[in-house]
Image: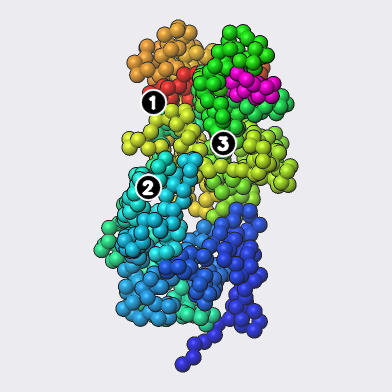
Amino acid sequence: MNQVVHIFPEIHDRNGNFKRFDYDWLRSDWPASRWEIRDPINPDFENPDFINFDCIVAPGETLLDYPELVEDIRKSIVIAVELDKSFHERKHTFQARSVSAITNFAYHLMRIYREIIGMGFSSPSDLDAGSVSDLLQRLALPEHISRRYAKKLEAYFDSVPLSDLPVAIHHDNRILSGVKQQVLAKAIGVTQFRTCLKSLGLIKSVNRQLQEHYAGIKFDTEILERETNPDKSSEKQVRDLYRVLRTFHRQSAYLTDFGHPLVVDPFSGTNPSDAADRVLQTVDVRVSKGSTRDIPIPVYLTLLDAAARWVLDYADELFELERQMRDNGTHKKAQNRAIRVLSAQSNHIGKVASPFPLGYYRHHQENTQGSKYSPEFLAEFQGYLEQGLSPKEVRQRLGLNKNQYLYISRIINDYYYQNVEHSGLSLNFALYGILPFCCQLLLLCFTAGRESSINDLRAGCVRRVAGLRYINLYIPKTVRDYEDLPTCALVERAVNVLERLSEEGRALWDHDKIFQFVDLKGDSKLRSFRFDDLASRFMDFIDLELDEHGNHWNLNEHQFRRAFAIMYFYRYGSDHETSFNALMHQLRHEDWTMTGKYLTQREAGATFRQIEEEWLAGILLKGRSNDPELVSLSSLSESVQKSVYQTDLVRPRQAERALEKVQEDSLTIEFLNFGAVCLGFSPGRAEKAKCAIKDGGEYLVALHKASERFCDGCPNLVQCSSLVSQKAPGRDSLTDLACDSPILDSVIASGGINGQG
């Protein structure tokens, strides 16, 4: 009986032929070896990913050497995207509804094909019930185990003399030498060795043998430790592979477009989920840690505090240093010295996370490297200068002409400033590495945007409407379009800094992205940075506390979204239904269960509230209030101020009374822009407000009327000098941000972290 031909206009032309063009999400020609993929819901969103079909499948062969199989894989990808609803089977098929889902589907399908070829078959059509069962068992193992990477590599090393191995030699030792891993992989028919510890051990062993034959050449001989065991199976990956296999079989059974369909049902009488449950009981499974572990609140706020200081306090001075260096046209041999001299005049030296004084202009470099002048010669030259000899006398004693003298003078100016104490940072790394990282950190935290959305930000993305700030963000996963979200002055400042950093690059390359820069290297190339790489370097720079295993804390978008939700929810309370709905809208969640997952960290929320209570107690102690109950708490004694702002565990009685008052009355604060806070939103205090409006039996606070003159004498007003900026802000919108951070200092001290500055 012939198979019924099903025609779908999404993938077939009017004659029933499979279309190889006209897909908005596919931005490459059909036969290309690498496909560029866009969001199928919003293809104009410029955050593509790529599918590379040129993967190794057998010794000396790649998937492109099997054109009929590649054609089937391409069709399967298109069907998965275009006919997602037609072939969707809840929990049992793979849905390709986003860029990441499309690429995951493609690479899982290519893994299946590699296993089939590795089993000795030429296509999926050759599989019978027994071989399909073997395939399922192989897919439950990491690929380097199922395809025996280490055994193949060991046999290769035994058969090839050491002298005939493909080796990359780097005589300057800037890059470690070693056997060419990609050449080895193609020779034995595997993809890569990154996850196979046994194979890496064999490679490092061979590198150690090679090092004995190459005097003075440094080889890559160390194996880095792994936090997870790559020899154990990933439960998620096994389930995804099974669902992709099920999807491909359903496509094969329903459509006639494949040259080599998968005929045998891999899950006859069962389903991918149950089959995965059974097979996972027979293999070693990597234990899932669930969601990314939360950073302790004091550590988290220390990180944010440091990032905020860079964006608010240090950015303008870094920009000014860049301008001075470019305007002065300093010779490159004296740039390091010049940047140390200029940055040593900074008022921010010694402050928390301060980059000043800087150590280098573009990068760290040994000034005598590659030079014919030895350190001894330079020391002799410097000695003559210190003796007061004239340039002519120095030239005569050392046999130098005038140009040589000038050249060596520039080297001396830099070389003898190497030992001047500095931060170790270059201006280039501070401006185009750490500063944009700090901006991204604050944007992730205070917008609750996803990493892809933040990376896509464009110039002019922040605008003001009726005095309120909005940021235009792309919303992936749910809305899949650009929307305006309310935001704050700190986000506006971070975007302004990024716009200034990217200004030259945007002009040269005619684009509007603010996370791509032309830095100080002078080659006019566009550069960006890797968030994860900068995160660990910044944590080291500010000496951030490590976890109990001695590792850096892991940062990702979900952690920032959780922190945003927790801070918001515990700030405005769970007793207001509108607060929960507003939070759902800000996060662009489709239902309450998505938001609820972020609010299970009650311990973190309680910590935020404890921090707020202690800080508010300090405001009551140091501030001026018109409420008799609060006036009695005020104290300007030095011991009490020290107690509150260091948050010692043992406080004087005044501090204890202030904290008890905050806790018993559930006092909350609303910041006012003239160096004060309003307590009117605390339980039972709205009716005391000068601006109170009675609505039925309820009193409401008209906070929009707040001003220094109008609020004068209000019992809910607490004025405090520590809330007033001590420096002139660059613009009006930064008034509330340019002051010290007593709440952060309080948290840092309570967490036992160095917070001086």
Q: Residue at x 57, y 15 (%)?
A: 382
> Is residue 459 inside the magenta stretch?
no
Q: CA distance from mark 1 to mark 2?
A: 53 Å
Which residue is more in the foreground, 235 or 111?
111
Left or right of 718 in this view: 462:
right
Give the residue drawn at x 38%, y 58%.
Answer: 236
Mark sitting earlier along the chain (3/2): 2
Residue sitting at the far bottom = 1
Amino acid carrying mark 2 in the image: His
Instruction: Indicate whether 629 appears above or below 269.
Output: above
Counting residues from the start of the chain, the first of labels 1 and 3 encountered is 3
In the rendered image, which residue does mark 3 sit on? Answer: 433
Q: Position of residue 400 (x, y in %)?
A: 64, 21
User: Does the image show residue 2?
Assistant: yes
Marker disc for residue 751:
1
Residue 271 visible in image: no
Label 2 element class: helix
Q: Secondary structure at mark 1?
A: loop
Name the residue rendered at 49%, 87% in the picture: 3
The answer to the question of whether label 3 and label 2 lie on touching residues, with beta carbons closer than 8 A, is no
**What segment carries the magenta color?**
398-414
Residue at screen point 56% across, 53% down = 476
Q: Position of residue 18 (x, y in %)?
A: 60, 78
Residue under circle 2?
213
In x, y percent, where is residue 267?
Answer: 36, 74
